Image (tube, coloured by chain):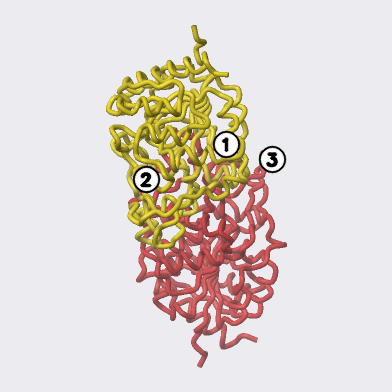
Chain colours: A red, B yellow
Amino acid sequence: MSPTPRRIVALAGGVGAARFLRGLVRAVDPGQLTVVANTGDDLVVHGLRVSPDVDTVVYTLGGGIDEARGWGRADDPTTVQDELASRYGEPTWFTLGDRDLATHVLRTAWLAEGATLSEATAALAKAWGLGFTLRPMSDERVTTRIDTEDGRDLHFQQWWVGERGEPGVAGVRFDGADQAVPAPGVLGAVAAADAVILCPSNPVVSISPILALPGVRAVLRATPTVGVSPVVGGRVLRGMADRLLPVVGCRVDAAAVAGLYRDLLDGWVLDEADANRAEAAAEYADHVAVTDTMLAEPDAAQRVAEVVLDVAEQAMGTAS
Amino acid sequence: MSPTPRRIVALAGGVGAARFLRGLVRAVDPGQLTVVANTGDDLVVHGLRVSPDVDTVVYTLGGGIDEARGWGRADDPTTVQDELASRYGEPTWFTLGDRDLATHVLRTAWLAEGATLSEATAALAKAWGLGFTLRPMSDERVTTRIDTEDGRDLHFQQWWVGERGEPGVAGVRFDGADQAVPAPGVLGAVAAADAVILCPSNPVVSISPILALPGVRAVLRATPTVGVSPVVGGRVLRGMADRLLPVVGCRVDAAAVAGLYRDLLDGWVLDEADANRAEAAAEYADHVAVTDTMLAEPDAAQRVAEVVLDVAEQAMGTAS
């Protein structure tokens, strides 16, 4: 019989990860869980440091998320940003509601006082009563940049939110990733984990920035790692992975995505709609499971998490 | 016949000054007016740099002030600060409405990007369409501190707003004033002015911090200077000058306040309620006028400003 995975690390992007984690925290001891969030999408808006993926995890797990949008706070007026725009001509392509803005004001204040992003993130997680450890992938700036087909170099958010993802994409880069130290505790948590979970997040701009940090792939290779496919029925449910996967030479396919992680993957969970891709996925991961991966409801997410843990258990039992 | 004062500098605190200035800009060419605002009350709230007197001048002259309170923005919800308090436990003794907060977010961003307080203040003044030049007294930090009778050293705002002015006051200090350089353009504007006006502001914590900066008193002595009494009918209309004047050895009296400026004062304007103090005031200023100094309505403020300009004209005619 395989051991039960206790110490878990989850690598997370935004909405999909947050909804999965809402199930995972019901299936494991949150005190043994570390979530490492992508910060490649972080940006400065009106001088305020915004960590979109961290905030989506915090608000979703803390119960403050706008469920319909999947990001930002529920019932959030935009008085401050309206004033910044109408009075001071500030751009508003990146919407910040007033309650949301409180988070960014405080994060920015803490960073200005000398706190690290890790410390600021931990303080936010504590304020929201999260029972697990939440870490940014790095305290240093790593920025996901989009090289557009028309020759421009845009911040990911400028491309996706600011220009609605319209410009064709020639390349994706993680500026600073090769020099950035993973945040304190990240490599240690992975090395000591019973299993690492790759949340159903965008492989190109959510998971890859974390993997691009020095040492991360190496420790993942030495730890049982299970991923959940963000591709369902040959499509992505939200976001723009369908635009970006081809840029990195990957088809929008639940097995092909597993191939991106082939050097470190031990298990892979696909949606029932992609059952016919399970065999192909088995080329990249020893343990493959097929289940309904819909995550919108916490109950459903918990069931998916339990399947992932089962696969992790299998991987632990066979890990070299 | 005396020359008409054209180039005017006004030294300003908050509410009283702003209401006076609303009349002054109707009585002079705003393009020839420089307002130097006290920044000794500036503070950092939730990491945001707040310049209360600058903001009161900007909002009042720009048409965005909450007339009833005399400070802050009209119709201003407090969603951000409510969130900062309820979610993050931030103190709320210094109320910041959402529209008001937009100003502080932007000022803080500009300063973080390397702008000077002068540059940030000028940008705010421009955004609000102020036709005159608005300068902070210094780009460097000067902080008005209150030594309480119970032995504490409080930021002025902590004492006045945070503790409702309740602790007895043993002393008032302007931390950093003797080392702080007046903001670029301040000494030059005073030196080149036809007349300087001391707005009807708190002598102890609004006008005195400006006078405490190196060089200010010296250039004022060489320029016709006219003050408007902030004491009316032996009382102060708002604020806490009645608490602070005795601390600096000054009675709450429209003539006694003129005595604080005796080394630099050429003219003094008292309210009709203090007509019996005009003779005493003449001991400190060669030119004294008595008028209704109520300022709430712009029309009334304009009339007061015209009296002040008349006195300045007399002072210019006799200045050595």
Where does the C terminus of chain A fall, quadrant-wise? Answer: bottom right
Q: CA distance from mark 3 to mark 2?
A: 43 Å
- Does A25 appear above or below A48? below
* Direction from residue B215 to residue B74 in the image, left or right: left
Pick the residue in front: B164 or B101: B164
Circle 3: is it few (<14), some (14-19), or many (20+) Cα within 10 Å?
few
Which residue, given by chain and number where applicable, does mark 2 sit on? B97
Mark 1: amino acid:
Ser
Residue A247 placement (x, y as % from top left): 65, 52
Helix, strand, or loop for circle 3?
loop
List x then y, in percent, for residue A302.
39, 73
* Sequence-wise first label, 1 or 2: 2
Residue B95 rendering spot, x and y as whole percentages: 36, 49
For disc 1, the marked residue is B118
Residue A248 versus residue B100: which sits nearer the camera?
B100
Res A297 label: none
Label 2 crowd (10 A; few <14 / some 14-19 / many >=20):
many
